[in-house]
Amino acid sequence: MSELALQTMVEHKILIIRGLKVILDKELAFLYKVKPFVLRQQVKRNKTRFPEDFMFRLTDEEVNVMVSQNVIPSRKHLGGHLPYAFTEQGVAMLSGILHSVRAVQVNIAIMRAFVKLRHMLAANKELLNRLNELEHKIERHDTDIETIFEAIRQLMMPPPEKPKRRIGFRK
């Protein structure tokens, strides 16, 4: 598989759970071409390398939400256990416990995918800021235009009639 194809595949495996960008253990095992059991076993043997911000186990509720939103087809897809979710740092730490050529290639692709995702999110944030600025300008312009229309309406109204001056002498 080419590096670009691998990176594209990785990009589709990244999920946002608990506000973090993560990849599930089953997906990582597939990418590394190892059995999920082997991956989890290596992680358990090196538990100190994976603090909560590197890896966490999903709750029943989170899995149910993923199934209901079609992120995963069913709970059976997970192999009968609650999956681990690895953050970018957790994936980097996996490279220290999985020592294969494939693991190195996959880690490189995963790091590039996370970086690409970060750039995309930053670009979207900048676009959102610009849209907010435009919206603010438009609101100001709307107010200015309303003021102009009001002035034009006042100018279009006929002037009030002044009382006519009487011609002749006043008594």
Image (cartoon, rainbow, N blue to C red):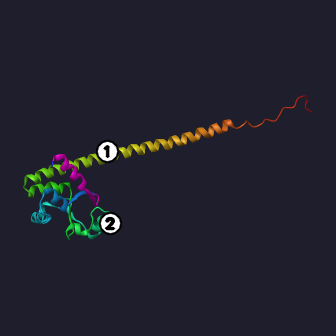
Distance of label 2 from label 1 (alpha carbons): 30 Å
Q: Is residue 135 left or right of residue 99?
A: right
Residue 52 picture quarter: bottom left
Amino acid at the residue labelled 1: Ala
Q: Nearer the viewer, mark 2 or mark 1?
A: 2
Question: Which residue: 8% across, 52% down?
Answer: 101
Q: What element does badge 1 sit on?
A: helix
Ranked by sequence position, the earlier of labels 2 and 1 is 2
Q: Is residue 133 left or right of residue 122?
A: right
Between residue 2 and residue 21, name the one nearer to us.
2
Question: Which residue: 31% across, 44% down?
Answer: 123
Residue at label 2?
A: 68
**Counting other residues with Cα less than 10 Å from the Cα at mark 1, is it few (<14), some (14-19), or many (20 or more)?**
few
Q: Locate residue 14, reporting x and y percent.
A: 24, 55
Q: Locate residue 10, reporting x and y percent.
A: 21, 53
67 drawn magenta:
no
Residue at label 1?
A: 123
For residue 61, above or below residue 130:
below
Between residue 25 and residue 146, name the one nearer to us.
25
In the picture, the quarter occupied by the C terminus is: top right
Which residue extends farthest right? 171
Q: Locate residue 18, reporting x and y percent.
A: 28, 61
Q: What element does badge 2 sit on?
A: helix
Q: Which mark is residue 35?
A: none
Magenta highlight: main SS: helix
Callout count: 2
8 drawn magenta:
yes
What residue span does the magenta drawing correspond to?
2-19
